[in-house]
Amino acid sequence: MKVITPRLREQQETFDSVVGVPLAFALVDSRCQTQQSLVASIRNPAMRLREFFAADAIKLNLEGSSKDELLKELIALLSLDEKSEAMLFKMLKRRENLGSTGIGQGIAIPHCRSLVVSRLRVVFGRKPQGVDFMAIDDKPVYNFFLIIAPPMEVSNQYLPVLGTIAQFAKEPEVPDKLSRLETPDDFLSLLEAQSF
């Protein structure tokens, strides 16, 4: 059983107030290596999400009709071999079993660390009809941000990127703007226009 110290509670409250999602959502493991850097990076305007996305890792018409199908479709955008895709799917399922990564407002951020990637990888997918992802607001999810990082990431960007995506998703107009995207370039332009 993990003891919540006053210092950890303060860090959680700081994260929650800045990002708007519980720190526990971001911290699946108990490695507290990045709690302070996470809060610091969220306040750092130098981080730009646009730098982490490529047009070939964006799909605006996901076809899957279940949580599992959508996860597999998002994983496929990473262009990994079949064995790596299967391993990554298991890791993401394990993460989802801890609690849904559906953060509300029609957005989910499935994420994990895995040896199948050598650097941080980020994917965006949209399911216009929505799907039940067991989100915290019990509403369908339309927009998916998949984040995968290696276990020992030198650049230490995994949690800061996760926090920045959560902050981006919390912007009131973002879900509507995501629903109107027509091309991957529109998505990249939206990130730039929103200063993310």
Image: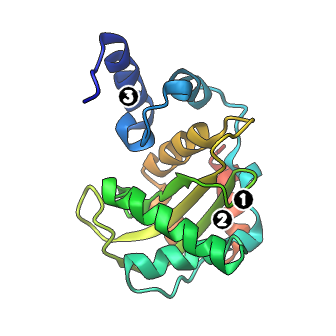
For label 1, count other residues whose C-alpha is less than 10 Å away and answer few (under 14), some (14-19) or many (20+): some
What's the distance in space between the residues labelled 1 and 2, CA to CA?
9 Å
Q: Is residue 42 above or below residue 110?
A: above
Q: Are marks 1 and 2 in contact (CB under 8 Å)?
A: yes
Tell me where residue 138 appears, x and y as whole percent.
23, 63
The image quarter containing residue 13 is top left
Amino acid type, callout 1: Phe
For label 3, count other residues whose C-alpha is less than 10 Å away and answer few (under 14), some (14-19) or many (20+): few
For label 2, count other residues whose C-alpha is less than 10 Å away and answer few (under 14), some (14-19) or many (20+): many
What's the distance in space between the residues labelled 3 and 1, CA to CA?
26 Å
Could you say which is closer to the camera, residue 44 or residue 91? 91
Amino acid type, callout 3: Ser
Image quadrant where one finds the C terminus: top right
Tell me where residue 44 appears, x and y as whole percent.
65, 27
Q: Secondary structure at mark 3?
A: helix
Tell me where residue 40 appears, x and y as whole percent.
58, 22
Reading the image, the residue beneath label 2 is: 187
In front of the other: label 3 or label 2? 3
Q: Residue at (71%, 73%) from the top-left corner?
A: 80
Q: Which badge, 3 or 1, comes first in the chain's sequence?
A: 3
Q: Which badge, 1 or 2, comes first in the chain's sequence?
A: 1
Reading the image, the residue beneath label 1 is: 53
Q: Secondary structure at mark 1?
A: loop
Image quadrant where one finds the N terminus: top left
Q: Is residue 59 visible?
A: no
